Amino acid sequence: MTTPPPSRKPFTRILLTGAAGGLGQILRETLQAHAAVVRSSDISPMAPSRGAHDEVINCNLADKAGVEALVKDVEAIVHLGGISVERSFEEILDANIRGTFHIYEAARKHGIKRVVFASSNHVTGFYPQDAELDAHSLRRPDGYYALSKSYGEDLATFYFHRYGIETVSLRIGSSFPEPRNLRMLSTWLSYQDLDHLVERALLASDVGHSVVYGVSANRDLWWNNRHAAHLEFAPQDSSEQFRPQIEQQPKPAADDPNSLFQGGAFTAAGPFGD
Ligand code: NAI
Ligand code: 15L
């Protein structure tokens, strides 16, 4: 690995995992503002490097030695990589559970002090949609995917208390160009607010292990970020602009998981492999 050029940016090199994914492609661009070098990684093909500031390394998160090499010479990690929907436990195990463990072990070995972890709203997916939650609400994971994110948050707590590695766990709602259904009018996180959230998660000081819901300033919110005020995350967008078009869609029945639970359809996925 080459030594990065001197820079006024806060970090010399940030590792971004999951860089080929929907959010990874966005953050690969915007993280350039915060680091002299952004090292992008994924198991899937990525757009080629555009220069020394834009490193691209393929890696399977299930490969412990590969992850250890990937983390060498980085100052902070934005960990998005893994399976991002509900799947069988066996599929989730390698990418998400082992993968996130490998990230923290590599962070420990290389002395990395800050991780931004893409958790998910699904760690509290089994709450009814009329419950207001905050970071102190007990988790109610809605599947194996959610359990892997819950484990990731526990890893973050452990590695902070044991090794002093700070993490901000982002319980991302639904981060897409636009909300796709009625549920997402509550859960939507715009890409602009996502960028701002990741920036605050990287730059805020003394975060220990902080948990924040990644959601825009939507009208009908289920999540209160009162325990994450120190991050100074101030979302600017709202899903309201999309309400008229979303309300044209057929309304889900009252007993549809999309009407009942914060986790929506994830709460009814599986069982797998019967
Ligand atoms: P995505 O599925 O588009 O991207 C995930 C990336 O991880 C993919 O490019 C995939 O190839 C990579 N990946 C999967 N297994 C891997 C492995 N074994 N080794 C290395 N890379 C692997 O997901 P998206 O939407 O970009 O989400 C990014 C992160 O944010 C994910 O961790 C997801 O769980 C989380 N998240 C996203 C939300 C959203 O609304 N987009 C909501 C809540 C959480
Ligand atoms: C997630 O955790 C998923 O990664 C994403 O694909 C969305 O489905 C999102 O949650 C959601 O809850 O809408």
Image (spheres, helix red, strand yellow):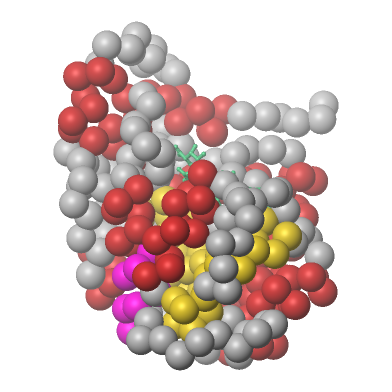
Residue at x 51%, y 28% (from the top left corner): 265
**Vertical order, 8 against 40 (above or below):** below
Which quarter of the rendering shows the C terminus?
top right
Q: Is residue 259 left or right of residue 235?
A: right
In front: 32, or 247?
Answer: 32
Q: Is residue 206 left or right of residue 76?
A: left
Q: Main secondary structure of the magenta part?
A: helix
Query: Would you say residue 21 sits in the magenta stretch?
Result: no
In front: 22, or 136?
Answer: 22
Query: Would you say residue 200 sits in the magenta stretch?
Result: yes
Q: Is residue 244 left or right of residue 196?
A: left
Residue at x 65%, y 63% (from the top left corner): 56
**Splitting the image into 4 quarters, where does residue 60 fall?**
bottom right
| Residue 209 shows up from this direction | no
Residue at x 17%, y 38% (from the top left corner): 219
The residue segment tinted magenta is: 198-205
Residue 176 appears at what percent x and percent y? 41, 39
Residue 23 appears at what percent x and percent y? 48, 49
Which quarter of the rendering shows the N terminus?
bottom right
Q: Is residue 10 left or right of residue 83?
A: left
Residue 112 appears at what percent x and percent y? 57, 85
